[in-house]
Image: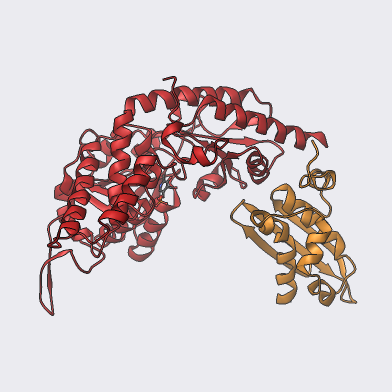
Chain colours: A red, B orange
Amino acid sequence: MKDSLKQHFPIYTSSPDLAYFDTGASALKPQVVVDKIREYYSDYGVNIHRGLYEASDRATTEHDTARNIIAQFIHAEPEEIVFTYGTTHGLNMLATSLGQDLKKGDNIVLTAWEHHANLIPWQQIAKKTGAELRFVDIDTDYQIDIKDAKKKIDSNTKIVSFGHVSNTLGSLAPANELIGLAKHVHAITIIDAAQSIVHLKTDVKKLDVDFLVFSGHKLYGPTGIGVLYGKKEKLEQLSPVSFGGDMILDVSYNSAEWHDVPYRFEPGTPNIAGAIGLGAAVAFVQSIGLDEIIAREDKLTNYLINQLSSLLNVQIIGSSDPPKHHGVVSINIAGIHTHDIAEILNRHNVAIRVGSHCAMPLMKKLGLPGGTARFSIGMYTDEKDVDTAMTALKQAIDLFTQIM
Amino acid sequence: MDDILYKDMILDLYKHPLNRKNLESFTTEKKSHNPTCGDLVTMQVLFDDDGKVKDIGHQGEGCAISQAALSLITDKVKGLTKEEIVAISEEDMLSMLGIPISHARMKCALLGWNTLKSMMNEL
Ligand SMILES: Cc1ncc(COP(=O)(O)O)c(C=O)c1O
């Protein structure tokens, strides 16, 4: 546990003093991912799909390998892995497709902490179909209120979709319980794993979830690539929402027959470098070991929360119990706007994110119009980063309490 | 700490804002939002019979820069006509603040000025 993992991340060579606390927005990229992408573009940067020459064959093989690595990582079958452009894309695909079957009287259950990506697509569907949106509330410890979920999920619930880990609070949703409630009423279940995928072990079989989506760039991979997992039988029932080449078996001027899953959901030339890069990112995570990563992150979260709690005026927006945080710790400082906190931290090379974190309804609910100052960590974050951040925070607090 | 951005005048205006109030009666009102930092401001202006600003108020949430800028611009326009307010330039606003404003903070610095300007143009 002693040796730093920073050595794997080239950004620390160019910016050795960076204290990066914005992994929740995007994780840093390890050298192996950069190399893998460069290798694709320099050595075999051509299209996939059965080009009858060597470079295309290699690209196709690497693309397939990436799919296999990712499938194994979440305990799925390769044909259950659809490459998307990210979480937002995956959720839009699901909302657009599943929304076709909804009607007035049906309801869609989300939670109070959804990222806009798992909110706005459903709002659009609700508007179009007349279906009702319901939101499972959070309790005083910023956790999902399962009693409320029992009230909100009923026989008219057709879809239950929730953020596995809140990108603002760091809280973990009780996935098994929510999915159990949804199954009881035969609702389709969707997990937005954008935050959880990098901090927790994801086993789609154990979760028994119908669909699960995440982004590559929050998992030490490239931007512009994501994954939509779907149980094979659920994918087969899902109608594609975008159309074009490579998704079809047979085409005439007036009709087309879909290719098998997952290909029918991947029309056009995909983000080949992105998929290959994500495969390398997942292989890298596995080479370090998720157990090791989780152990490091738990220890660090504990340290971070203890340090933050020791500062006067700092309020943790989230559970006061460190183990209930998964990579994310949000704070509010009385008398200092979050934007000013970020500005002062930046002068110390401390990168945090402030504002509503694409969860405006939650911010309004919590009465925090300026949002929160969010610290999110990755495998590379260490105690020295936390110490740097604390020095900067103390300075911000001093500056703003000087004049009273 | 010596800080060019958070100099005493800015922090002082943040702690003790000018014209931060709700007007009972006003000629015009506008809400504005700067989503990058959550700044939300409502400005109200009351003109007198000669078409000059008799009173002005602002309320809302924002960072030190946006709040200080709001205090400054609201104080500046008292007694001015609509035309005189519209004539206040971006440079004027920034020089009132008197601090170097980075690209990232420009929206904060200009929130009040922008809101006021579009209010006047809508009159
Ligand atoms: C919980 C959650 N859902 C969805 C998203 C959207 O991810 P992306 O912007 O990669 O599509 C994010 C990223 O901020 C997130 O944290």
Residue at (37% x, 46% y) in the render: A34
Q: Nearer the viewer, residue A83 or A330?
A: A83
Residue at (40% x, 43% y) in the render: A218
The quarter of the displayed image where residue A51 is located: bottom left
Residue at (46% x, 41% y) in the render: A24
Q: Nearer the viewer, residue A362 or A333?
A: A333
The quarter of the displayed image where residue A76 is located: top left
Task: Give the x, y percent position of residue A200.
Answer: 35, 32
Q: From the viewer's perspective, is A183 left or right of B122?
A: left
The image shows residue B53, relative to residue B15, as above or below, that is: below
Farthest-out residue, bottom = A253
Task: Give the x, y percent position of residue A316.
Answer: 57, 31
Q: Nearer the viewer, residue A153 or A39?
A: A39
Farthest-out residue, front = A43
Q: Is residue A327 visible?
A: yes
Task: Give the x, y percent position of residue A172.
Answer: 40, 33
Task: Give the x, y percent position of residue A141.
Answer: 49, 29
Farthest-out residue, top = A2
The image shows residue A147, relative to residue A104, as above or below, that is: above
